[in-house]
Amino acid sequence: MAESSGFDPQLALSHKFPETTYTYTARDSVLYALGVGACARDAVDDDELKYVYHANGEQFLQVLPTFAALFSLASLPNGFNLPGLEYDQRLLLHGQQYIELYRPFPSSGCIHNKVSLAGLHDKGKAAIIEFETKSYEKESGELLCMNRTTVFLRGAGGFSKSSQPYSYSNYQTDKASAVKIPKTHPFAVFEDSTQPSQALLYRLSGDYNPLHSDPMVAKIAGFSRPILHGLCTLGFAVRAIIKCICKGDPNLIKSITGRFLLHVYPGETLITEMWLDDLRVIYQAKVKERNQTVLSGYVDVHRLTSSL
């Protein structure tokens, strides 16, 4: 328990995270797009070729909005650490990802990341920590996006100094409320197959956790084989929304919320169900083979296409 380590939440709130720089090329954005399944079903897909090839003489590639999640990963090179907080890395769970997008990403660039603590919550036997990463284009100083990464640390709770469990947030918590999936028939449904090698391809975008590649590590963690990265599953779901709701236009995406509910094994089929609620797309992704929901959330869009 964090209590025995002398963890002081007030000290954590005053902690200053180092600012970092993340440089990527067009090759990196292409590799990411392939890692989340772009053009896997159709190598000349009209909606997705622009992520991997300069189609129709275009000078620049387009970048998927979920590429933003890589900035948050790069902004925490030392992991999800706070002064005095001790936990077993094997017991860390990525609970949720929230992304706000302020402008389209260049196909290559240099990103300046600033990290702050957005939330800290004592859940008794566990702790929930939220890290906020603001990413700026280094040359212009323009804010490109914001990530809020929520991690669940089993065995790291119990640090409250009073009978009232400690809880801190620097934002309105209603934005992180649980998504209620409508009981009506979905507005759109998209089925997509992950490849058996999907995690091996996605890891090349920077997440080299052996849970996604090493059979022995996966078995120790309780899985029959390596599992897919949660952010890869999110990439598949948002791709489905761009295709079905945004009619292929990634720049219509305003913000993304994804709550990770269950693991996906590479090679399984993902079914993304979507409901429209004004300018919000509520969605859930299921694994077809096990009929289990693995991801849910919502995506806010700037506007709906005229065809809808």
Image (tube, rainbow, N blue to C red):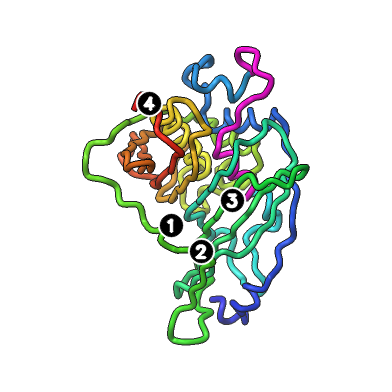
Circle 3 residues within 10 Å: few <14, some 14–19, many ≥20: many
Give the alpha-carbon distance from disc 2 to disc 3, as whole Å. 13 Å
Sequence-earlier tag: 4 or 3: 3
The answer to whether residue 66 is magenta is: yes
* Quadrant occupied by the C terminus: top left
- Residue that label 3 marks: 146
Tell me which amino acid carries mark 4. Answer: Ser
Q: Give residue 114's position: percent from left, percent from top.
A: 69, 56
Q: Is residue 300 magenta?
A: no
Left-right relation of 149 to 186:
right
Outermost residue, left side:
184
Q: Is residue 287 left or right of residue 242?
A: left
Task: Return the disc, 1 or 3, that comes first in the chain's sequence.
Answer: 3
Among the two numbered marks 1 and 4 on one chain, the one whose residue lies closer to the N terminus: 1
Farthest residue, direction right: 139
Residue ID at (58%, 21%): 50
> Cα distance, mark 2 to mark 1?
8 Å
- Residue sitting at x 67%, y 30%: 107
Q: Which residue is mark 1?
A: 175
**Type of amino acid under label 3:** Met
Q: Nearer the viewer, residue 227 or 169?
A: 169
Element on which disc 3 rests? strand
